Image: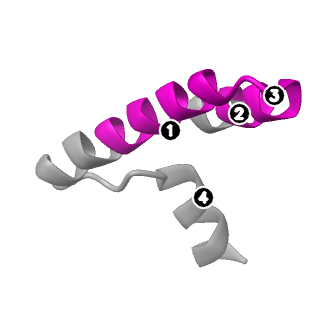
Amino acid sequence: MEQTLAHDAAERGWDREVERHCCTSDRIDKLLADLGQPAHADENAEVSSG
């Protein structure tokens, strides 16, 4: 979701919002890694089954 919001903000030229959403996404990924969980489980499932 944050990546979608960052992309939308980039299209609108809202650089500070892009930075904010990217930082949030990076933080979520780090927290998931700390918990031993994949950051993008749905993407990994598609690659595995494809």
Give the mark nearest the N terminus, 4 or 1: 1
Distance between the alpha carbons at the discs numbered 3 and 4: 28 Å
**Mark closer to the observer (1, 2):** 1
- Residue 27 as seen in the image, left or right of residue 33: right
Amino acid bearing label 3: Gly
Distance between the alpha carbons at the discs numbered 4 and 1: 18 Å
Q: Magenta part mainly helix, strand or loop?
A: helix
Distance between the alpha carbons at the discs numbered 1 and 3: 15 Å
Which residues lie in the magenta part? 5-28
Label 4 neighbour load within 10 Å: few <14, some 14-19, many 20+? few
Percent position (x, y) of residue 2?
57, 30
- Helix, strand, or loop for circle 1? helix
Q: Mark 4 points at which residue?
A: 43
Q: Name the residue under label 1.
A: 22
Distance between the alpha carbons at the discs numbered 4 and 2: 14 Å
Q: Which residue is drawn at 73% across and 77% down?
A: 50
Give the mark nearest the N terminus, 2 or 3: 2
